[in-house]
Image (cartoon, rainbow, N blue to C red):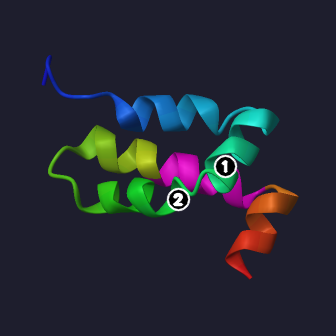
Amino acid sequence: MAGRPQYHVLCMMTSGHVVGRQAIVVHEVIRPLSRLFDDCIDVVRRNAHRAIEMISETNIGLRLSL
C-alpha cells in the first residue's frame, strides 16, 4: 500500500473545505471518487464515502444530487 496513490485521502481532506467541495463538483471528481466505493481496501471505501457525504451536506452538493 506504500506506493498506492492516496487519492481518497486527498478527496476527503479537500471535501472538508468549502473551496475544496466546490472544486470537486466543478472539476467533476464525483464519478471517479464514487468508483472507490468498490475498492478492496476498507479505508479507501470509507474515505470515499466520507468525502461524498461531506460534499452532499452543502448547497452545491445538494443541487448536484437533485
Q: Which residue is tagged 2?
A: 30
Q: Which residues are magenta?
A: 49-57
Q: Label 1 sits on what residue type?
A: Met
Q: Label 2 sits on what residue type?
A: Ile
- Left or right? Give the position of 59 relative to 39: right
Give the vertical position of 58 relative to 51 (above or below).
below
Magenta-highlighted stretch: main secondary structure?
helix
Q: Which residue is at 31% across, 39% downward?
A: 43
- Left or right? Give the position of 66 relative to 27: right
As helix, strand or loop, the secondary structure at mark 2 comes to helix
Q: Which residue is at 69% across, 75% downward?
A: 65
Disc 1 + disc 2, Cβ < 8 Å: no
Q: Position of residue 5 (x, y in %)?
A: 26, 28
Q: Which residue is at 78% across, 69% downward?
A: 62
Location of residue 23 by image quarter: top right
As helix, strand or loop, the secondary structure at mark 1 comes to helix
In front: 40, or 26? 26
The image's mark for residue 54 is 1
Q: Position of residue 6 (x, y in %)?
A: 33, 28
